[in-house]
Image (spheres, rainbow, N blue to C red):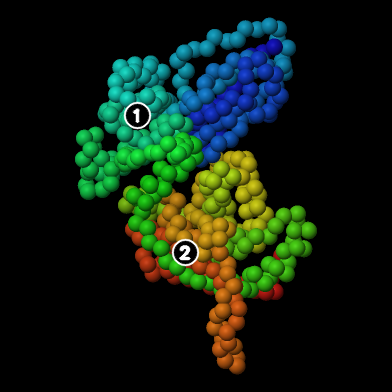
Amino acid sequence: MANVEMLMPKMGESIIEGTILTWLKKEGDFIEQDESVLEVATDKVDTEVPATHAGILKKILVKEGEVVAVGAPIAIIESVSEATGNSKIPELKPEISSPKEELLGISPAQTATVISTFSQVEKQGDDDRFYSPLVLSIAKEEKISKSELSSILGTGKDARVTKQDILQYLKNRAEGKVGSPSGEINSGTLANPVQRVEMSISAQDEIMEMDRMRKMIAQRMVDSKRISAHVTSFVEADVTNIVLWRNKVKDNYKKKEGEALTFTPFFIEAVAKAIKDFPMINISVDGDKIIKRKDINIGVAVALPSGNLIVPVVRNADQLNLMGLSKKINDIANRARINKLSPDELSGGTYTVSNVGSFGNVMGTPIIMQPQVAILAIGAIQKKPAVVETPTGDVIAIRHKMFLSHSYDHRVVDGSLGGMFVRKVADYLEAFDLDTEL
């Protein structure tokens, strides 16, 4: 039998490394081709990695919790596809150049030097976190001291610092947004490290460790509030036509298509139309530059069974009709809840919608998904008495109404644009045609 290296697969356009979460198979187990062998976490999603060949899992090369570059070997499989006799496992070279090292121009020898340099320092202090060779090499190049490195809040497994964490820290430090090692704050802005607040704990209190996703969410939410000047505008929309039309067609739709017709496709359709009217909502900020996005890729916040939130993206939402949006949203929402999304399906969003009404909330003040500049919260639909204009005069009628809460980055989106955009979304919802056909 031939020994075959199983490599860390490419899991998305922007993904260059992943953290080994769990090995689902152990050494000596027989595995089928495409059978899940391990779980890997990236900065976007956790996913299962299938076997590239059928055979025996001869040797696991990477332990759980370690960070591995895309393309690096992670296991040896004794393949049954080629009968080549009893060959020995190839000797593993201790110095394997990985793609992330090549990207930074770091040779294996330099990596070893970096690890050796920091190993003396790592024995000091109370920071027992593991740092990957990539992070250590960046720290050495940028003259980040051990004490400063330990202050960086990591979003990796066990709060480990990822490449993205340290690069973001360097960017914030250059812009004067992080504190110095001595604790002073530069340029009057908030320090990056989260300051711990002393608290008393009673015997009845339960202490729970944040999971990896919750740590990542916490870091990104704090970053977003620090980066963007959040402002929120509110508009109430009359969605009676949508409610009546959906009630009329939803049973036949479910019988025909085998899935529910929710309100979310209506909201996404209205948002996509409004973005085309106000394209300066569909932008990102890069330093002092504004990037105007051509594609309209709308993220949809989905609540997971764990209580965490994940935001899969509907790409080119403006090019889908109501049925197309319904099928796409149902698909990504269902796969998000069972952790079957690819990293690419969680990236590239240009605007985000969060349906807080599904939790019974009438409105909210959502936090922007960086590097986007706006996010819309959809409130619960409620029956309300309202004044309705008729040809014979005003009357009081029961209408279905909801609040739209539009949070936007006041650095680049002024109140007029932010307010007109959410008003336009409401206009599209209110103008829904009762004669629409699927």
| Quadrant in the picture for the C terminus | bottom right
Give the mark nearest the N terminus, 1 or 2: 1
Residue tagged 1 = 138
How many callouts does the rendering have? 2
At horizontal 63% and vertical 73% (from top left) the residue drawn is: 241
Between 410 and 384, the residue placed more toward the observer is: 384
Between 15 and 403, the residue placed more toward the observer is: 403
As drawn, 57 above or below 377 = above
At horizontal 59% and vertical 76% (from top left) the residue drawn is: 399
At horizontal 65% and vertical 29% (from top left) the residue drawn is: 36
> Is residue 408 shown left or right of residue 12?
left
As drawn, 17 above or below 295 = above
Q: Residue 247 falls in which quadrant of the image?
A: bottom right
Cα separation, mark 1 vs mark 2, equals 41 Å
Q: Residue 412 falls in which quadrant of the image?
A: bottom left
Q: Is residue 254 visible?
A: yes
| Quadrant in the picture for the N terminus | top right
Q: Is residue 163 visible?
A: no
Q: In what element is the residue under mark 1?
A: helix
Image x and y of residue 243, in percent:
64, 69
> Is residue 3 shown left or right of residue 41?
right
> Is residue 308 shown left or right of residue 155?
right
Residue tagged 2 = 405
At horizontal 56% and vertical 79% (from top left) the residue drawn is: 385
Kindly identify the amino acid type of the residue bearing the numbered disc 2.
Ser
Q: In what element is the residue under mark 2?
A: strand
Image x and y of residue 124, in percent:
29, 21
Q: Residues within 10 Å of mark 2 (few under 14, many from 20)?
A: many
Task: Please identify, in this view, whether the residue under mark 1 or under mark 2 is nearer the observer.
Answer: 2
Kindly identify the amino acid type of the residue bearing the numbered disc 1.
Ile
